[in-house]
Image: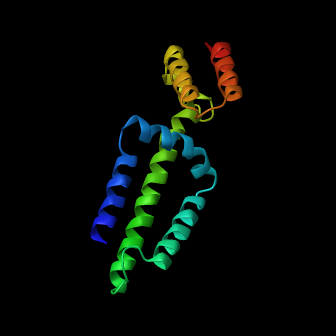
Amino acid sequence: AGVAIGLIGFVGTLLAGPAPYAVRLRHRLAPTMREHPLWPHAVLAVVGMIVLLIGPTGTPRRGIGVVLVVVLAFTGLEVWRRQAVDELEPAAAVEGGTGETTAVPAPDRLAQLAALHADGTISDAEFEAARGRLQESG
């Protein structure tokens, strides 16, 4: 059971890190996590219940251990969700949503837009609209 819990923690750490695959995953999930913040928690709750019912980690003899793992899992998920949403917020600024784009030169904003478009964070239509706004203002 300890190895399984440690492995889950290790995977969570990898997904929160700066690796390209982790950043791409966070960027793809961020819009959903921003618009529906309870969905990731609901999925974790269902998966947790299935794990407890199947019992691959053995019989939970001590309730405090189960409670501690559940609290850590939900806390880690919320931290990861907020990290993904915070990373997505610059996209809204680039698109002109918050007004913070005045300090960023137009070529840099265009490069940010291209990066967001390349990794699938913004759609083709969103990219073209934001690029058009940049060209009008620049």
Answer with the quarter of the image where residue 9 lies: bottom left
- Pinpoint residue 101: horizontal percent, then vertical percent: 54, 26
The correct choice, above or below, for 100 with respect to 27 in the image is above
Horizontal and vertical percent position of residue 98:
59, 35
In percent of width and height, residue 62 lies at 33, 86
Q: In which quarter of the image is the N terminus?
A: bottom left
Q: Which of 71 and 87 is in front in this view?
A: 71
Q: In which quarter of the image is residue 55?
A: bottom left
Going by the image, does 138 lie left or right of 11? right
The residue shown at (63%, 18%) is 134
**From the viewer's perspective, is residue 39 above or below residue 28?**
below
Q: In this view, does 34 lie above or below 75?
A: above
User: Which residue is located at x 54 percent, y 16 percent?
Assistant: 106
User: 61 or 76: nearer the eye?
Assistant: 61
Q: Could you say where residue 61 lies in the image, as x and y percent from the top left?
A: 34, 87
What residue sits 35% from the left and 44% below the top?
17
Colour convention? rainbow
For the point 52% across and 73% down, the residue is 50
**Closest to the observer: 14 or 86?**
14
Q: Image check: 48 left or right of 62?
A: right
Quarter of the figure with the C terminus = top right
Count up the numbered dots: 0
Q: Quadrant of residue 113?
A: top right
